[in-house]
Amino acid sequence: MSKNITTFLFFVISIVVFFAWTNPWLKEVGLLKEERESLNKTLENFAELQGMRDRVLEGFNSISPEDSSRLSKLIPEGAEQTELMVELSNLADASGVIISRLNVQPEVEIAKVSSFSALASQALPKYKKVNLDLVCSSSYEGFISFLKGLQGSLRLVDIDGIEFSSKADGLYEFNIKAISYFRNNNI
C-alpha cells in the first residue's frame, strides 16, 4: 500500500512540477503565436499596398509622353512665371495685342490634398496659384482673338475680370485680372 501511495505522490508531484515548470513557457508560446498572427496580418497589408502601388505605377507608365507633356503644360510643376509671360507675349503678338503692363502677384495656397490615411492628414497644399494683372491695347477683334488663343492654350488660366476703356487712337485698353495654377514642388 505504501508503494501505491508513493507512486501516486510521485505522479502528482511530477504533474505539479511539469505544469509549474512549463506554464511560463506555455504563456510565452501563446504570446509568440499572437505576435506571429500580427506580423502575418502586417505582411498581408504590405502585399496589398504593393499591389496598389504596382497598379498605380502601371497606370502612370501607361500615360503617353505626349499626354504627359500636355498635362505638365496645363498645370506645370512650379510657378514658371517667365514661361507664362513668354506664352502671353506670344499670344499677344499673334493676335495684334500690345501688352503695356504685366504684373505677377505672389503665389497663394489654394486646395489641400485629401487625406486618405493617417500619414496624409498633415499634407502640404497640392496646388498653388499666381494672380496676373495684364494691361494691353488692341482693337476689339484683336482682343477677342487674344482671348480665343488663351482659351485654346494648354496652360490653365482663369479670367477673373476684364475692364476696358477706349483710347483716342481708336484702340481699346483692356485690364485683365486672371489666375494661373501650378503644382506645389514640395509634394
Image (tube, rainbow, N blue to C red):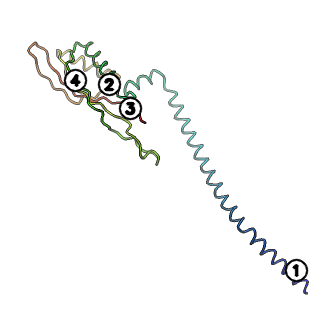
Query: How far from the left and from the top, in percent, is residue 165?
Result: 12, 22
> Which residue is disc 4 drawn over?
134
Q: Which badge, 4 or 3, comes first in the chain's sequence? A: 4
The residue mark sitting in front, 2 or 1, is 2
Query: How far from the left and from the top, in percent, is residue 171?
Result: 13, 15
Q: Quadrant location of residue 9?
A: bottom right
From mark 1 to mark 4, how far is it between C-alphas? 106 Å
Task: Please tell me how many numbered marks the rendered image carries.
Answer: 4
Q: Which badge, 1 or 4, comes first in the chain's sequence? A: 1
From mark 2 to mark 4, how far is it between C-alphas? 13 Å
> Which residue is disc 1 drawn over?
7
Using the image, tell me which numbered label, if any, was put on residue 155.
none
Q: Are marks 1 and 3 in contact (CB under 8 Å)?
A: no
Query: How far from the left and from the top, in percent, is residue 13?
Result: 81, 77
From mark 1 to mark 3, how far is it between C-alphas? 84 Å
> Which residue is disc 3 drawn over?
183
